[in-house]
Amino acid sequence: MHDLRYALRTLRNRPAFAIAAILTLAIATGANTAIFTVFYRVLLRPLPYREPERLVFVWNAWKNGNRTEVAIPDYLDRRIEAPAIEDAALIAPGPATLSLSGPPEQVGAARVTASFFSTLGRGALILAASCAALLMVAVAAIYVPARRATTLDPLIALRAE
């Protein structure tokens, strides 16, 4: 108890030291919380899919060990002829160009088969939401450049073509 009173009296008599100590503790606590939150989200938290322990990633490999993307005929053969595979989806990652209200920008994207969401255990609602989002992006991709290019209403300009 004597040590606590001494610490409080010292902090009261030296306010600059008190502020520095409190800020140091606050920043350290915040940084520690942020690091462990990222660590948990990336490494420890289970995947947000139905039965994540049953998900596997399959690719083709050359004899020298280099991996290659799975070709569509290989994907179809595996889907039909491998009884151990309950469901399958083909994913082809690659860049995409996004151009809305500025210079074009390359973003990461992936082309997937129709069975992608069902394989991950996501239902038709997710698929419908994704389709709606893609439709909005497509409309924005047409509307924004057309609006920048002309003072006319772009919907009228597009209708005239």
Image (cartoon, rainbow, N blue to C red):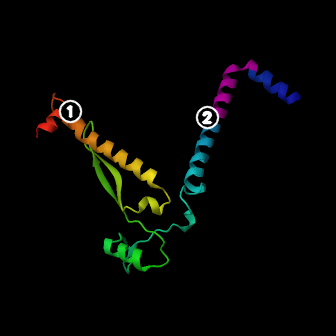
Quick check: 149 above or below 121?
above
Residue position for label 1: 147
Residue 161 lies left or right of residue 81; in this view the side is left
Q: Residue furthest right?
A: 1
- Snapshot quadrant of residue 80: bottom left
In the foreground, 135 or 96: 135
Looking at the picture, does residue 19 appear above or below residue 61?
A: above
Q: Position of residue 41 (x, y in %)?
A: 57, 50
Instruction: State the extent of the magenta-drawn residues as a range.
Output: 12-26
User: Which residue is rendered at x = 48% and y = 72% of the image?
Assistant: 86
Mark 1 neighbour density, 10 Å: few (under 14) some (14–19) many (20 or more): some
Using the rendered image of the protein, determine whether residue 65 is visible from the camera's viewpoint: no
SS for tag 2? Answer: helix
Q: Are marks 1 and 2 in contact (CB under 8 Å)?
A: no
**Along the viewing direction, whichever of 35 and 86 lies nearer the viewer:** 86
- Which residue bears the numbered disc 2? 27
Relative to 42, 119 lies left or right: left
